[in-house]
Image: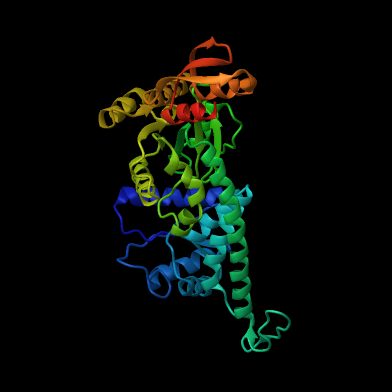
Amino acid sequence: MQLPDVDDRAFEASVAELHRLARTLGTAVVATVTQRRESLHAATVVGSGKLAELKALVGDPPLDALLVDHEITPSQARNLEKATGVEVLDRTAVILEIFRRHARSRAAKAQVEIVRLQYMVPRLRESGKGKDRQRGGIGGKGAGESALELDRRKIRDRIAELTRELDALAEEQRTQRARRRDMSRVALVGYTNAGKSTLMRALTGSEVYVADQLFATLDTTVRPLHPPTHPRVLISDTVGFIDKLPHGLVASFKSTLDEALEAGLLAQVIDASDDNFERQLQVTTEVLADIGAGEVPRLLVFNKIDRVGDAEVTTRALLARWPDALVISARQPADVARLHARLQAFFARELVEGEVRVPYDRQQLRGEIFADCEVLGERYEDDAVVFQVRARPEALARWRDAS
């Protein structure tokens, strides 16, 4: 169900996106009801006429759920459920359920559960009027604590436990990022299902998870660019964005999005085959600004050009508007090679030449130097090997300190 206050094109895109969200949940959409209003009905979201239409739709044959493409209040959801007799899920609930199903790492699962619990608290209902649970023992409040109060306290305790777990995991992630601080890093960012993970696999040769679904990737994966470059360039995949993404989810994935904040370059991936790609580009740009990554250098990468009707005409039109962008298909090796070269060239501008002196008793460092630097030559002295290198200034200073 949609209640748009937008132009027709944006409305159609919103309808299509709700259908895709439903398909990602494995739910078949059998009907769409729309209503144009200045605001949602305070009690039942839609007006009486549309409510009657909904009642007729859900009753024959009986439906499992009603999806609302807005964030609605707990009372609106309850009233709509009473009126229709089926479960009501607003946009936030749908996205949260997709996140819950797709979370794989400990961090992602904890992040999603925290937001889900925070979403549930105001929606808890008393299990029975006048019923209290006797609560004794350490931490108990004794008689008089209702089932609802107990449930809320359990949720608060669980959120506190998950927050402590996340804090510990975040510290590990900060340590890992600190080790990569003086390396060349690219973060793939963009709207969900723009093809970031497919591009990640093509650029790095890694077996990252790829699926034609919304929010298939919730965890950050970091891999070196392949074929290898000297110095290494690290590529990180990030969680995708979506229009009207619940703020709590953006905040909860801050540690994941920190990869974008600390990257030297953002490769902003756009699905060129989507009719609504301009809105998706705008949403991604706004979210990046919200998390403080608005000033990070950016390369626009229009992906999926193989899915448009006339690729040549579309490419010319895109480059006319965004002349510095790349228009590619992540499934075409030649296109991936062009992006590979553009990324390598971007970081090559920062390289400086210098010497690194490595004593003979520390030759185990040789492999790391070849990974972090472009070695131009080497000479042998009485007590050390001297490497002539091109490297990022930070890396060159670190190797000089280490030797």
Position of 64 relative to 263 (above/below)? below
Image position, residue 354 (x, y; %) = 43, 20
Spot occupied by residue 128 in the image (x, y as percentages of width and height): 64, 83
Task: Evaluate whether residue 28 shows in this view.
Answer: yes
Foreground residue among 373 and 201: 373
Q: Nearer the viewer, residue 19 or 143?
A: 143
- Residue in the foreground of this view, choosing between 246 and 91: 246
What residue is at 59 percent from the left and 74 percent from the top? 152
Location of the C terminus by quadrant is top right
> Can you say whether 206 is above or below 355 in the image?
below
* Viewer-closest of 294 and 42: 294
Q: Is residue 180 above or below residue 66?
A: above
Question: Is 376 rendered above or below residue 107?
Answer: above
Q: Is residue 115 left or right of residue 69?
A: right
Q: Which residue is outermost to the left? A: 320
Residue 266 horizontal side relative to residue 174, left or right = left
Residue 280 appears in which quarter of the rendering? top left
Which quadrant of the view contains residue 244?
Answer: bottom left
Which residue corresponds to the image point at 26% horizontal and 32% vertical from the top-left?
Answer: 321
- Asked whether residue 227 is in view, the answer is no
Where is residue 387 drawn, in percent x and y? 51, 16
